[in-house]
Image (cartoon, helix red, strand yellow):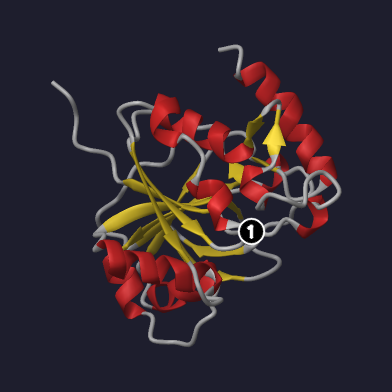
Amino acid sequence: MSGPAKPALLILAGGKGTRLATLDSTRPKPMVLVAGKPFLHWLVDFYRRQGYRDFIFSTGHLAEVVESYDWDARFPGATFASVRETTPLGPGGAVRMIFEKCQLDAAWVLNGDTLLPQPLPAVDPRHEAIYSVLEKDQLFDATPNLVVEGELVVAERAGGHYFDGGAVYVTNRAVARYQGPVPCSIHGLLKPAMDARRVGFGVVPGTCYDIGTPERYKRFESFIKDFSKC
């Protein structure tokens, strides 16, 4: 028998990629080609292999590049939707808009330029949000930014205990708590839930890969060439 359906993946895919403009200024950052395919293709491929089938792209800058890619043909059996940001909302504001528009109960929110090459942590129903976190000795050139107390994330700031790995499970209960201004970050969106001590975390072994700088791009390119052989 198959297990319970996996939650949707809400992927933030509207980044400009200013520091990658020398590689390709005609694409949003998640659609920059790596080993012949967009980074976002590799991200979807990884999660399809884990059994995820429902993908929602939050688009903005050069949205048509994401929307025109032949996702259905390349990933049969999966469903794809795009929600375009027409005014600047920030990542947190975009997540809130999509939760309302798509009437989501919960979703994993992923950075569209980051791949965490390990299974996502188990979902604990006691929490309204759950961060996937990395230990500081597993980081490439980043610094810990999540402050924890026991099993809870209580703040996001420099000098934290763990690093946000670019994947956070979010429920509509956490989203509904936020009544602040937009644009806002994903951490800003979740701050009321943190203050209410409703945000947990799961430590993910290994490291993460992203393409935020030319150096990180080269690091991911080396990784994906081995991954694509599997």
Residue at label 1?
A: 15
Left of 172 or right of it: where is 111? Answer: right
Where residue 150 appears, as percent x and y from the top left, is 45, 60
Left of 76 or right of it: where is 137? Answer: right
Q: Is mark 1 on a helix, strand or loop?
A: loop
Q: Picture quarter containing residue 226?
A: top right
Q: Which amino acid does label 1 sit on?
A: Gly
Residue in view at x 67 percent, y 57 percent? 144
Residue in view at x 73 percent, y 55 percent? 17
**Residue 227, visible in the rendered structure:** yes
Q: Nearer the viewer, residue 63 or 189?
A: 63
Q: Quadrant of the N terminus?
A: top left
Left of 25 or right of it: where is 124? Answer: left
Where residue 76 appears, as percent x and y from the top left, is 35, 26
Q: Nearer the viewer, residue 133 or 72?
A: 72
Q: In this view, does 49 lie above or below 15?
A: above
Q: Quadrant of the C terminus?
A: top right
Question: Label 1: few (<14), some or many (≥20) within 10 Å?
Answer: many
Q: Picture quarter containing residue 7?
A: top left
Q: Which of 135 and 191 is in front in this view?
A: 191
**Residue 119, visible in the rendered structure:** no
Q: Is residue 12 above or below residue 86?
A: above
**Identity of the residue furthest to the top in this view:** 229
Q: Is residue 99 above or below residue 32?
A: below
Residue in view at x 71 percent, y 42 percent? 137
Q: Picture quarter containing residue 211?
A: top right
